[in-house]
Amino acid sequence: MSDRVTVLDVAHRANVSAATVSRVFNSVASVDPDLAKRVRKAASDLSYVPNPNGRALRRQRSDLWAVIVSDLQNPFYTRLVADIESIGNEQGFSVMLCASDEDLEKERRHIQVALSQRMAGVVISPSSESRTDVSVLTEAGIPVVVVDRRVAGYSGASVMVDNLQVGNLAAQHFLDRGYTVPACITSSKDVSSAHGRRRGFVETLGRAGIEVPTERIFSTDLRYESGRETVLRMLEAHPEVDSLFTVNGPLTAAAFTVLKGEGVEIPERIALIGVDDDQWTAMVTPSVTVIRQPVSEVGRIAGELLCQLSGLKSLAGATVVLSPELVVREST
């Protein structure tokens, strides 16, 4: 069993953070004795054997980065990874791509691999704002850059898009076009990007006197198939809707496919605004209005930050927030 038990398993068993477990087994004197005792008992119960190479993490790093993203079916992340890899390769780093599939357990395992392999750095798009834990990496001295979504309690290097502004731009465009019965399809998960976009959308419309009631805010996972089901449900429950905002690329593709398949005229019957300027959005008829995220810039800056952190330059509090752009096309 010891071959499969990780620091994170011990942390869960002892009800402490992974960073506390790491400090206990690295003999850090500041650990509370009662916590240390609890950790050692949990480790014993699980037959956990510490990695003898763990203490060398700060001194012995590979030339490998881990890039942990939440959904490889979303073109945003494939482009993001390509730009991070390009920067890394220029500086002599190779990239190991890991997909969490919005699954916290898979994400934990990827983080543990990055730790055990003494990677030179990790870029992560977290699966959960409140439950993703990168402290085991930072405590071990592995540089981390968080992209796209926030991690609660993390104050290190990060690269984000202004997600409130994403929602603001979509809402203001609907207002400018005279739409008055909007709906929104957003994430059912604990991810800051989608929630920020929804909040910006609803608040901007609210300031203009147009309410978006909770029954017209549809929550789903951020995948194409789930999006299709959600759009069908919206059409059945709320035929009065005249405009729809979808918070990521796969949901936008799902909305467009369903509206066209159901014979709903775009934009005459329902206007559509999505997020991310995926290639298909300019190729279809009608072409789709989107809020474009500067994905290449996100990837480039994340790679540059990680290069600097890997070179032991202090960027612990570096937070970069980039602006989105409205791209107006035929769907509005």
Image (cartoon, rainbow, N blue to C red):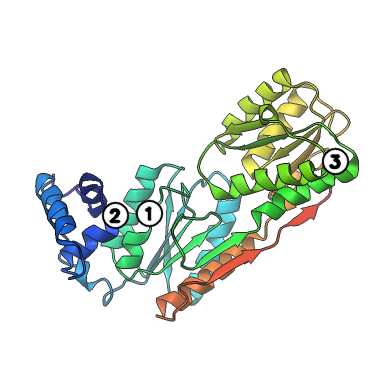
Crowd tier of the residue under label 1, counting other residues whose Cα lies within 10 Å: few below 14, some 14–19, many 20 or above? many
Q: First in sequence, mark 3 or 2: give its number.
A: 2
Crowd tier of the residue under label 3, counting other residues whose Cα lies within 10 Å: few below 14, some 14–19, many 20 or above? many
Query: Residue 94: x and y, percent?
Result: 42, 67
Mark sitting on residue 133: 1
Marks 1 & 3, CB-CB < 8 Å contact: no
Which residue is the site of mark 2? 17
Q: Quadrant of residue 161?
A: bottom right
Marks 2 & 1, CB-CB < 8 Å contact: yes
| Helix, strand or loop for disc 1 | loop
Identify whether 209 is placed above or below 19. above
Mark sitting on residue 332: 3
The residue under the point 25% across, 47% down is: 15
Instruction: Identify the image quadrant of the N terminus.
Output: top left
Identify whether 263 is placed above or below 277. above
Q: Quadrant of residue 67?
A: bottom left
